[in-house]
Amino acid sequence: MYVTRLSNRPDADPIHNYYEDLVIEALNAKMSIEDINDEEFSDIACLALNYLPPKYIRHEVDLIYFSNEGETHEMRKLAKHAVQKATRVVKLNTR
């Protein structure tokens, strides 16, 4: 989800939760080895994001300046674990 200022100016910088990128990345990797349909994909992504703290950024380059390699690795690890946990919950509670 990308948020822009209320002015909707074309030059407004979008902000987004960086964990969205990491969750989708982890979920795409999981899909390559596990059967996950579109409905489950969305449910898992939402649930995984609810397990994680928000990490809002304006640009990907912001992470280079405001986090180190260890923090980035830890964020990826947290996203992967959140996706694993969310997958278990969704698979146990299929509609």
Image (cartoon, grey):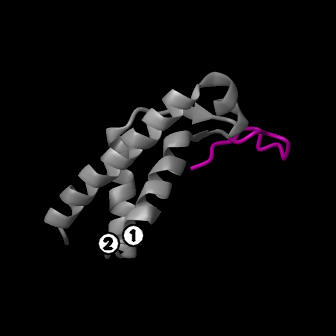
Quadrant including the C terminus: bottom left
Furthest-right residue in this view: 11
Q: Which residues are magenta?
A: 1-14
**Res 34 label:** 2
| Residue 90 vertical placement versus 16 (above, below) | below
Which picture quadrant has residue 69?
Answer: top right
Is residue 42 left or right of 73 when viewed as pictured?
Answer: left
Q: Amino acid at mark 2?
A: Glu
Secondary structure beneath dot 1 equals helix
Q: In the visual, does 21 lie left or right of 29?
A: right
Q: Position of residue 54 (x, y in %)?
A: 46, 33
Q: Residues within 10 Å of mark 2 (few under 14, many from 20)?
A: few
Residue 23 visible somewhere in the drawing? yes
Where residue 84 appears, as percent x and y from the top left, is 28, 53
Q: Which residue is mark 1?
A: 31
Residue 68 in the magenta stretch? The answer is: no
**How far apart in space, not on screen, are marks 2 and 1 (Cα)?**
5 Å
Q: Measured from the top left, where is residue 14 in percent x and y?
A: 70, 42
Q: Where does residue 36 sit, x and y in percent of width and height?
A: 33, 73
Regarding mark 2 in the picture, which secondary structure is present there?
loop
